[in-house]
Amino acid sequence: MTISTEQQPFRHRRRPLSERMLDQGFRLLVTALACSVGIILLWILRIIVQESLPAIGEFGTSFLTTSAWDPVSNQYGAFTAIYGTLVSSLLALVIAVPLGVGTAIFITENLIPKRISSLIGLMVELLAAIPSVVLGLWAIFVMEPAIRPALSWLHTSLGWLPFFDTEPQGPGMAPAILILVVMILPIITAISRDALQQVPGELRQAAYGIGTTRWGAICQVILPAAISGIMGGVMLSLGRAMGETMAVTMIIGNSNNFSLSLLAPGNTIASMIANQFGEADGSQVSSLMYASLVLMLLTLVVNIFAQWIVRKLSLRYQ
Amino acid sequence: MVPSSGLRFRPSLPRNLWNALMTTLVAIAAVVAVLPLVLVLAYVLIKGGQLISLQLFTELPPAPGMPGGGIGNAVIGTVLVTGIAAALAVPIGVGGGIYLAEFAQGGRIARALKVFVRFGTNVLSGVPSIICGVFIYALIVKTRLLFGQSYSGLAGGMALAVLMLPTIIKTTDEGLKLVPNELRWGAIGVGASKFTTVMKITLPAAFTPIATGVVLGIARAAGETAPLIFTALFSNYWPWPETILSGDTGVLERLSQLKDPLLNPVASMSVLIFNFASTPYPDLQSLAWAASFILVVMILGANLLARWLGRFAAR
């Protein structure tokens, strides 16, 4: 048998038009879908800026530094809420970071059998899945009554400090901070655990090889190597804590009277929006939009800083 | 002289004391971290579990101060609004993920677009959920953009969709990146088009991680409250009029009533918990605990399902 020379077994086959159209159409479609994320983000910014323009024009930067919130005389200032947002999320971070990083070390550094450590990891991840409104319900009816004696004790023994100089009476800043700790703990733990697990085994072995102890290795070798991931997780959870709405709204007391005391009711930007937006109108809506803009910019800065810090601090081992 | 004790473990050495102290501290940290989950779960399961009955699913919330009643409308409403959100966010998110993983190579424009989309995804996932609600309120509810209706299930679904979108894009992107390149080369080698390669080869190969991410995203959205309080609002009635099942109205009219919840306020379990928790009526408060029970069981169930999916795929 011979192959005739006219036959070209590998002749170039042009793709049919329909196939090329389908390919191009598909490419265009997924490109458009991908772009929609960025467009939605810009759209959110645009809408919020546009809606807050009247308030920005009326109050300017004094909105950020005054704490009047008076719908009757149309005077608005968000200082109490901005202060509450910053204080509650930073204090929650101060409590949650040692606990979260400690838990992550506990479950990654072979201190306990693998079975138990993965069980703890699973439980912390499930804690992250509990809706914040359920945590808020729990905080109102279970946590707050349970910790009130401790808060009263703080007031009676440390009442001379401005931070504890009011009588605790139910909802307030302190319970809100504690529920924020519960909410951001899983994020810090999960991200720290991932960062610690990614530290190359050679580093650990080398540290043990030159005779250090377990905690010598953890403090001087492993934690510095994982610090970029851990810091990124901390910043992400700070952003989450600032924007956290439901649990905080349910337990913080929603008072716009400025008070240094952590035992007094307070407000955060998110809780103020959740509480007042429904029945607001006119310049109050615009003021709440202005507050939303402040909140959005705060979380934006924190999140971008988180991404930057991960890139800046990450060590390369290659 | 070499001290003979040099190789023996001496617990009283400063460094060994330090080790013991630090180990104890992190053990305490772990216990404290797990404690809230145990306490919350215990309370929700015990307090809410006692209240579970068939009546809970078949009746409407009672008037304040009245005993009994159920949360049937909120259960249906949560499923409905989350379903709308998934129907909007899953196609967009999976498409965006396909773009990032499969198409965003090559030219300078493609690379710039990729950075834009990645950055947008990261930032959007950090936008507080209340902002999503405020955005949809200003865009749709206030302007009555959707057929002249203000608060509606569709608006609620859109707010949740904005929230879910980044999760779905990220998991699709990461799932597709796990597919070995040999599969793509093989498909292109036998003459498949890009469309066929993605639809028949890479997407099915990455099905499990994507499904896991989608399930987790839906579970998270089902528990969200903040985006719903100014968009879907709440309703004390069933999403559909009761005559839709057994009324004497015509079939066409009943079919057209199917769209009612899309354009009217819809109840949801999360908003119900928020509203009822702040009322002084013990009966409404216990309905809030019951709703928490159903919500937590649903969400933890979805999480365990996603985890099982992941393990099933690894095998």
Image (cartoon, coloured by chain):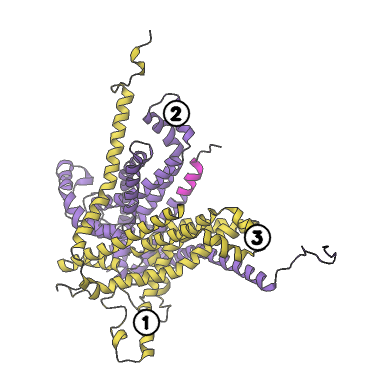
Query: Which of marks 3 and 1 precedes in the sequence?
Result: 3
Given this view, does label 2 or label 3 mark the residue nearer the observer?
A: 3
Q: Nearer the viewer, residue A80 or B102?
A: B102
Q: CA distance from mark 2 to mark 1?
A: 67 Å
Seen at 44% across and 28% down, the residue is A207
Camera-near label (1 vs 3) is 3
Q: For the residue marked with disc 3, what is the amino acid?
A: Ile
Identify the subunit bearing mark 3. B
Which residue ends up furthest to the top in the rendered image? Answer: B1
Q: Position of residue A152 (x, y in %)?
A: 15, 47
**Magenta: main secondary structure:** helix
Q: Residue furthest front?
A: A1
Which quadrant of the figure contains the C terminus of chain A?
A: top right
Disc 2/disc 3 C-alpha distance (Å): 48 Å
Circle number at residue B188: 3
B163 part of magenta stretch? no
Q: Is residue B71 left or right of residue B109?
A: left
Judge whether A258 appears above or below B29 on screen. below
**Label 1 chain ID:** B
Judge whether A131 appears above or below A263 on screen. below
Q: Is residue A259 visible?
A: no
Give the image location of residue A291, x and y in percent. 37, 61
Is the Cβ of the residue at disc 2 closer than 8 Å to that at disc 3?
Answer: no
Label 2 marks a residue whose chain is: A
Q: Which residue is mark 2?
A: A207
Q: Amino acid at mark 2?
A: Ala
CA gap, disc 1 to disc 3? 46 Å
Decide: is A309 above or below B41.
above
Please, which residue is most extreme toward the right here? A5
Q: Secondary structure at mark 3?
A: helix
For the image, the number of numbered tags is 3
Number of the label disc, if any, that sits on residue B258: 1
